Each structure stands twice: as C-alpha cells, then as structure tokens.
Image (cartoon, helix red, strand yellow):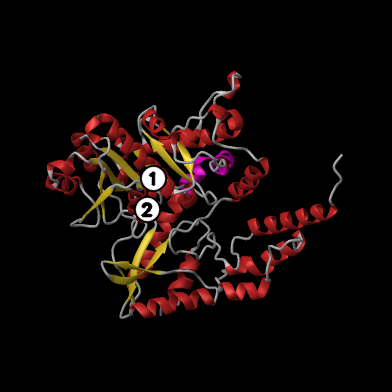
Amino acid sequence: MHTIDMDLVEMTLDVMKYTIDRISNITPELGSPKKEEELLSLVGETVTPDGIGGENAFKLFRDVLVKATVPIDHPRHLAFVPAAPTRAAIMFDLVTSASSIHGAYWMEGAGGIFCENQAMEWLVSLTGMPEKSFGVFTSGGTAANLSAMVAAREDWKNRSVDNIGQKGLLLTSHGAHSSVQAMAKVIDADLIMIDCEGDHLTGQELQAAVDELEHKDRKRLFAVVATGGTTNAGIIDDLDTIAEVCERENVWFHVDCAYGGGALAAPSVRNLFNGIEKADSVTIDPHKWLFSPYDCGAIIYKNMELAKNAHSQKGSYLEIFKDEGAHGFNPADYQIQLTRRLRGMPLWFSLAMHGTDKYRDSIERGIELAKLAEKKIEQSPYLEMVRPSSLSVVLFRRKGWTPEQYTDWTYKNHREGIALVTPTKWKKETVSRFCFINPDTTEEDIDIILKTLE
C-alpha cells in the first residue's frame, strides 16, 4: 500500500489553484525577460543533490520565473504570431499530460488517437482536399513542413532510378517562412527563392522560374512550397494558378498555412485560398489561429501512402501485437517523430465543447479587429497604412519615425505593461505590425496602443 505524501497533496492543491487562477485571468501581467545572471541571483541553484522541495520550487516559479516570461494570450500581445488557447484546450492539455498516453501507435493510444483524428477530419474538411486526404498532428509548422518535404523528396526519388543519389531542388518565394529554408538544409536539398513582382507568388512567376531552370536542374525539382498567409504580412500566394503549374510540371505542391490556415474556417476570406484543395500537402498550426496550446501543428496529405512510404519505421518490438483492437491508425507512420504526445487532444476537446461555429466566429473576429485597426490608422494624422490589412495582420508606419524610435516605443510599452507590439521590415523599411489572434482583444485595446504613438 502506498502511503499518501501530504506534502505532495499540498503542493498539488497549490498548483491547481494557480492553474485555475491563471486560466480564468484573461489579462495576465505582461511579464518581461531578465538576464540569466539576474534570474540566478533571484532564485539560486534549483537542481541540487538533495532537492529544494516542490513547494519551494513552485513558489520560485510563481513569484519570480513566470514573471520573466511574456504571456502569449494577453489581449494586447500583438507581436509575432501570438496565440490564444481556449480555456477548454488549456484544461485538457493538463488532462493530456496527466493521462500519460503514448501517441505514436494505435495499440497504446487508440482512444486518444481517435480524439485527434476527429479533430483532424475537421481540419481536412476546411481544405476541401480529396476524400482520402488525411493528416497527423506535429510539434509545429517546422516539423510539419519537414515531414512534407521528406515525403515529397521520397516520392520523387521513387519515380526514377536516375533520381536516387541526386540532390533534390525546391522552389518557393521570398515570402516563405524561414522554416522552409531551414528544413531544406536539414534534408540537404537546394532551394531557389523566386522574386515576385507583387506581394505574392503567382503561377505565371512560378512557370517562368521553372522554364529558366537548366535541364539537369529541372530533373532535380521535386516540390514547390506556396504560402497561405505569410507570417509578416498575412499574404496568400495565388494558390490556384500555382497548383496548375505543379500539376502540369508533375511537381509536389505543398502549401504552408501554419499561420493562415485558421482562416480557412472564415467565410469572409475563404475564397483567397482557392486552389489549396489541389495541394499534395498542407501545413496548419492549431497553436496559432485555432486556439490550441503550444505546441500543436498539423500536416495533411492528399496521398497518405506516399507519406507512409517516407516515414514509417520498422522494428521487431513494434510488430508483436495480435489483438485486433491494437491495429489502427498509427500517427508515427506519417511524420518525422516516433515518440509523440497527443497534441491534437486539447484541440479536439475544445472543438467538441464549443462547436465549429464558435471557432468560425472567433477567427472572423481577428479579421474584424484588423480591419478596425486599419480604419483607425487611416483616420490618424500621424499614422498611415503600409499596405491593406491581410487576414489578421496590419502593417503601418508612424510618420517620420526612425528604426530606433520604433524599437524604443516597443520597449517602453512592454516595460510599462501596456502591450507587446514589435516592429518589422517591409521592403527594407522599418514599420510597425499588429497580428490579431485573440478574440478577447477589444477596440479599447487598439485605442490604448495607438494613443502611445501620438
């Protein structure tokens, strides 16, 4: 019989109280980072031979360390691509961890994988991809993009013995996420980035880039990566015409919708993604605009067998189960990770609790906030839009400001706990940027931030 550790019970109650308080607080303190030396002086060494005790360790986190972080769900956190997980998703993330389910194989994780697959069916339906299209949850967009590139390259290699041993070639635009460049390095593929005349890649520009390739390089081309909502400006490539070129040239068509994918559920902008249904693979990050906790990405394939051929791992210890109930969908067969937690379960619970209509309305709210901010900026005598808002991103400038003034403004607002809004670059110019994700952000929040620019 195990004895009850009363200290552990007490600590558990403290942790749960903190968790409940934090989940219910929609405007947490906008903390800020501190230097490592300063944190060490405040908390001391925490990993010691005898331990410092759970109560003490938790107190250090609650009172010091968490205040050196920036909460991504603060309604005035409009930098980068923030996140705003639902309270339901956060709570079920606790359940996911507490349940200790291994999510690689159906044999161990059938019930949890079933939940993930229910959520995945909805994601796939948003893309309009063919009936047998499906996907798996990953750690984020980088892992999803890598999984897609590996599947695309293996498919290319398997088409001809001449391709085996050859270095593959990818095409994308300068607006593509940095992970596309990074993952091309990981798989040792060459990458050509296409200059676009406008803000987004078109089929005509893609075709011109393909036609410019030497014959030997054309034979190495195995995939094109288009973007469904750039991180910096929310721009969507001309997916329909790009799809036509990829089909004509027999090249894998991947769409990176890590940020913009949530907008597939928004009727007001769904037409901007026309052509995505023709993709061979699509990346979406639920931890961005689908209100899931970090970390949760997704990769969707038109042909799951091609993904399985690239990613399935074999091992004698994996093939010993004869019970019929042990055989089913194995997420490890379709992306780069073997060991994985069930990242899709919090999304499933939140969808099951709130319904997809609530998701649609919350995503539309982000788009509405961007348009509202755009209108206020256009009415201001000292501000001006850099380009029209796109999805939930707004790029604007403070007239007459230098890059240093943007930086000073960012740090001042953050230091005073007002907001986190960071500058970015647009065509070599330093400008300011809003990215609206959180439906709890209000018109008053926008006014508070804009007033600091006077």
Residue in the foreground of this view, choosing between 451 and 248: 248
**In the picture, residue 350 is in which quadrant?**
top right
Please give the count of numbered marks on the rendered protein. 2
Tag 2: Cα neighbours inside 10 Å, few (<14), some, or many (≥20)?
some
Q: CA distance from mark 1 to mark 2?
A: 8 Å
Give the amino acid type for the residue marked by disc 2 in the picture: Ser
Query: Vertically, is 225 above or below 13?
Result: above
Q: Position of residue 322 (x, y in %)?
A: 59, 19
Q: Tag 1, which secondary structure?
A: helix
Q: Are marks 1 and 2 in contact (CB under 8 Å)?
A: yes
Write the residue at 28% across / 63% down.
Answer: 387
Residue positioned 39% across, 60% down in the render:
370
> Is most of the magenta stretch helix, strand or loop?
helix
> In terms of secondary structure, where does tag 2 sit?
helix
Q: Which numbered tag is attached to residue 146?
A: 1
Residue 224, image x, y percentages: 26, 44
Asked if residue 68 can be seen in this view, the reply is yes
Q: Tell me which numbered mark, 1 or 2, is placed earlier along the sequence.
A: 1
Location of the N terminus (image quadrant): top right
Residue 320 position in % (x across, y down): 58, 23
Q: Is residue 217 above or below residue 402?
A: above
**Res. 266 in view:** no
Name the quadrant containing residue 271: top left
Residue located beneath label 2 in the image: 179
**Residue at position x 38%, y 68% in the image:** 376
Disc 1 crowd rating (10 Å Cα; few below 14, some 14-19, many 20+) is many
Residue range corresponding to the magenta coloring: 346-361
**Image vertical order of residue 430 relative to residue 388, above or below:** below
Q: Nearest the camera: 47 or 41?
A: 47
